Image (cartoon, helix red, strand yellow):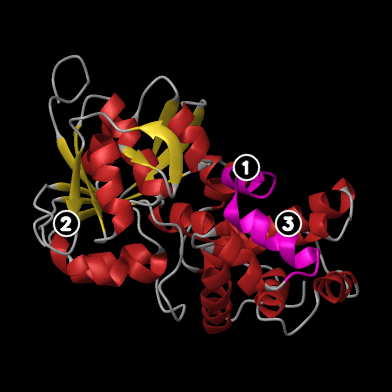
Amino acid sequence: MNDTGTIGPMTVSVVGAGSWGTAMALVLARNGRQVRLFGRPSDALNSLGSRRENLRYLPGFVLPEDVEIADLGSEKVLDEVVVVAVPSSAVQEVLPGLARARVIVVASKGLAPGGEALLSDVIADKCPGANIVVLSGPNLAVELAKGVPTAAVAASTDEESACLVRDAFHCRTYRVYLSDDVKGVETAGALKNVMAIAAGMSDGLGFGDNTKGALLARGLNEMARVGLALGARMETFLGIAGVGDLFATANSRLSRNYRVGFGLGEGRSLEAILGEIGQVAEGVPTADAALLLARRLGIDVPIIDVVHLAAKGEIDPRSAVWQLMERTPKREGLSSGRPASAGD
């Protein structure tokens, strides 16, 4: 970092050439960083390299010529700063190639399959020499690529690494704040996708804003209780990475998770909805993993539970809503900063 508070030339590898990874690469390139965008070998990746436009996942945005398109199958990720922007299910697969990374940015929003750990824990275990930074916030890929103003949080226990990531991404339209609450920022970013499915289901069923407002308030409570049990702080869930991201994802038709929920609410099958979207909706596998995680922590998560059941076709969305409404109300809120009783 120089005397003006900005960083000098930096090369950043972005692993994941979907809509989110492409949007990340665009922001970095516009900020003057040297960017290498890695993707799985495919016709879409070849087209991205030749046409400079991600026609499948993020059409309408041209990558600068100096953004290098790289094949994960044949090239090594050698840069010291690496952004992981692949679906959560693919994180384990890409980790062997990140051994030389000094800073790994977790931009993926999900949980490790099986609910055994957060993605940052998995990465820290496989890449012990790297400092981990979680980057999360209300960042829909299309809006980020358009330069629509938004914000995010870079969370790390290593402040220097968090500052490095902030400076790499921060610009006039992307304000990046700092935090050391890694578990809070990551848990909020993962679980809000499940709540976005629930919100979409409510809208797809034709319920009103009262319904969704109550649903999201209780959803935020569930998110926070899981996070607090993992050691997170409550203020994280009341900030940009929590309620900010939840509001954006649960109210936008740009959100794949919201669209999944809306389709389920309309009575469509999950298979048909995902086929139409053509991309991963992280809230679906996250609901499964989050339910297992909550059970391991001894926390009742009724909204996550019904999303899990509805996605699997084991309960219809309307019955799921009434199942939630018929629960006996307990005390509102959290008790002394700790998870509320299991029966809330």
Which quadrant would the C terminus be assigned to in this image? bottom right
Q: Which mark is residue 200?
A: 3
Q: Earlier in the sequence, mark 3 or mark 1?
A: 3
Q: Which residues are magenta?
A: 245-268
Q: Nearer the viewer, residue 312 or 62?
A: 62
Residue occupied by mark 1: 248
Whole-angstrom CA distance, mark 2 to mark 3, is: 38 Å
Name above or below for residue 184 compared with residue 89.
above
Main secondary structure found in the magenta portion = helix
For the point 30% across and 56% down, which residue is it? 43
Q: Is residue 126 visible?
A: yes
Q: Is residue 135 visible?
A: no
Q: Which mark is residue 130?
A: 2
Q: Position of residue 185 (x, y in %)?
A: 46, 52
User: How would you rate the neighbour count of disc 3 (Cα within 10 Å): few for under 14, some for 14-19, many for 20 or more?
Assistant: many
Q: Residue furthest top?
A: 4
Q: Which mark is residue 180?
A: none
- Report the mark closest to the observer, 2 or 3: 3
Q: Nearer the viewer, residue 57 or 86?
A: 57
Q: Which amino acid type is marked by label 1?
A: Ala
Q: Position of residue 336 (x, y in %)?
A: 64, 59
